[in-house]
Image: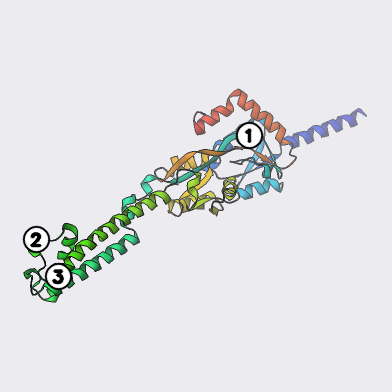
Amino acid sequence: MRKILFGLCLHILLLAQMASAQTLTVSTVTRPPFSMTEDGAETGFSMELLAALGQALNWDYSIVRNAQFGEMLSQVIDDKADLAIANISITATRETQMDFSQPIFESGLQIMTPGENSRSPSLLRALLSLDLFLAIGIAFVILMTGGMLMWVFERRAQPYFDRPANEAWFPSFWWALNLVVNGGFEERVPRTPFGRLFGVLLVISSLFVVSVFTAKITSVMTVDAITGSVNSINDLYGQRVATIQDSTAAGFLDRREIDYEAFSDLTPLIAAFEDGEIDAVVFDAPILSYYASHEGQGKASMIGSIFLRENYGIAFPTGSPLVEEVNQALLSMRENGVYDDLYRKWFGMRN
């Protein structure tokens, strides 16, 4: 009997050791500065937090790095991974499909726009606008036509216009241009009745031409100032806005009825942003801030303050027995300073 009991106890111990030695599958996705690889090594705030948890809980685990955020969550939902960690926002919808640890990071959304160095000056954009080119073209036609008409009226009366037609086009244009800009020449005053009448009409019309140029430049610059700058959420309407599909940012934009382009992942979104195809990106503040201060330095600017505050957590399949022990370990890490050390390493001092 004692041998049987001893055998059962030994079997139970072996099963416990086998269970404790089981390698956990951890699903993640590349999201600097939370989860990424450098020189083949896993790094980032979330990955170093995972390493600290693994050491505290005596875990063996393997990393599965997914191409897209949705794939990472699907592995947890389908029970193909024991947990997922990156920048996973805890939301009511996700809570119905999986379990979460206590929050590991407080985040929120923010707006990123092209940096000042990547935007051409407003005056330059105004001068290069199609509308202004058309206005200049029309003005040239008017001045050329007016000058040649004056040549027709004055070629036999005013010595300045006494020249053949093939030689008169530029002097006539120059006369009309100076009439508009300077009010004309005293020594080249029209001498015929029709010439004088037409000269008066040109002077009066010059006020209109100058006003059109001034109004055109002003209007183009004003429209650019209104539509070309993003300073808050309300400025996103009518802009080329982008975010990641099925993200909390996408849900926010949907609720605000702001049109946006949804990208499958951060890499193509950043590529489109750098190519000038996007006016504003709305996404997780720490992700955008990290890009703006590293690869996007000089190319991107963070706008306004963080809004729609949210918390990141570690995701588990529904009913996972790992949740409780992870929560206890996270509490211990906050109490013994391990969590604060990691936070300062990646984000500096907390506000």
Q: Residue at x 25, y 68 (%)?
A: 141
Left or right side of 281 for 62: right
Residue at image coords 64%, 40%: 90
- Name the residue carrying label 2: 186
Q: How is the image coloured?
A: rainbow
Gap between marks 2 and 1, in whole Å? 83 Å
Q: Secondary structure at mark 3?
A: helix
Q: Position of residue 162 (x, y in %)?
A: 8, 73
Q: Is residue 43 above or below residue 257?
A: above
Give neighbour class at mark 1: few <14, some 14-19, many 20+ (Cα, 10 Å): some
Report which residue position mark 1 lands on: 103
Disc number placed over residue 195 in the picture, else none = 3
Across and down, in percent, residue 312 comes to 61, 38
The answer to which of 121 and 219 lies nearer the viewer is 219
| Quarter of the view holding residue 102 | top right
Q: Three-letter amino acid code at disc 2? A: Glu
Give how far across and how far down residue 18 sits, in percent: 75, 37
- Mark 3–mark 1 Cα distance, whole angstroms, equals 85 Å
Q: Is residue 260 left or right of residue 198?
A: right
Residue 294 visible, this angle? no
Which callout, 3 or 1, points at the residue further toward the start of the chain?
1
Mark sitting on residue 237 = none
**Between residues 10 and 141, which one lies in front from this camera angle?**
141
Identified by mark 1, the residue type is Pro
